Image (spheres, rainbow, N blue to C red):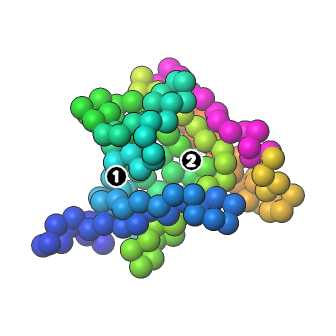
Amino acid sequence: MSANSADGPATVEVVLVKAGRTKISYPAELLADDGTRVSVRAPWAGEGVRDFGFVRFEPGDVFTEHYWRDRWYSVKEVRASGGALKGHYCDITRPAELSGGRLVVEDLDLDLWVSADGTDVRRLDEDEFAESGLSGRDPDAAAAAVAALDELDALARGAGLGTLLD
């Protein structure tokens, strides 16, 4: 599918679902869709500044987001308004679904942050994942989520996340 038409770039609505409800939705420019990976770009969609202590997401930041239909994660390249790479924020999710102009992804609580220089790799929200009860409700999905986090962590500490995005 071509990401561009004669009328300009195509857009999709990115819908992040958590615990059965929409957590956030926002419009994004569709950059590419090869049938397996969908890539979009959007400005920071959160309210104001979100300061994690190790990175700040703020108005003007631009997220280039990569979603897979066959993998249990998404990788978001985060750049400051001036273009400097802040790092990569990875969400552990069920595989993405794109239909009717909506890219829907279910967040499974686990996350990974990788700083721009790759020296700071942080596993996030493992406590939320444990408290979510997914292991009891859907042990196969829980195992896939943990395996996805382990895969991204190993990749970030090894060859780097860029190998996923080439």
Q: Mark 1 Cα within 10 Å, few/some/many (few <14, many 20+)?
A: some
Q: Quadrant of residue 111?
A: top right
Identity of the residue furthest to the front in this view: 48
Q: What residue did someone put label 2 on?
A: 91
Residue 105 lies in quadrant: bottom right
Q: Is residue 132 visible?
A: yes
Question: Relative to 129, does residue 84 appear above or below in the rendering?
Answer: above
Residue 127 pos. (x, y %): 76, 39
Q: Is residue 123 left or right of residue 43?
A: right
Using the numbered discs, state the Cα–Cα distance from disc 2 to disc 1 in whole angstroms: 16 Å
Question: Residue at left 56%, top 47%?
Answer: 91
Residue at 50% of width from left, 40% of height from top? 89
Residue 160 visible in the displayed image: no
Q: Nearer the viewer, residue 90 or 163?
A: 90
Q: Is residue 63 above or below residue 70?
A: above
133 drawn magenta: no
Q: What residue type is disc 1 on? A: Ala
Q: Position of residue 113 (x, y in %)?
A: 54, 34
Residue ranking furthest to the top = 119
State the extent of the magenta-drawn residues as a range.
118-130
Which residue is located at x 68 percent, y 39 percent?
125
Looking at the picture, how far across and down is residue 96, in whole percent?
Answer: 53, 64
Instruction: Find numbered disc 1 in the image and state the secondary structure of the residue it sits on.
Output: strand
Whether residue 37 sits left or right of residue 29 in the image: it is: right
User: Residue under circle 1?
Assistant: 42
Figure check: 54 above or below 88: above
Q: Amino acid at mark 2?
A: Asp
Residue at the image point whose x is 14% and y is 72% from the top: 7
In the image, is residue 82 above or below residue 135? above
Quadrant of res 12: bottom left
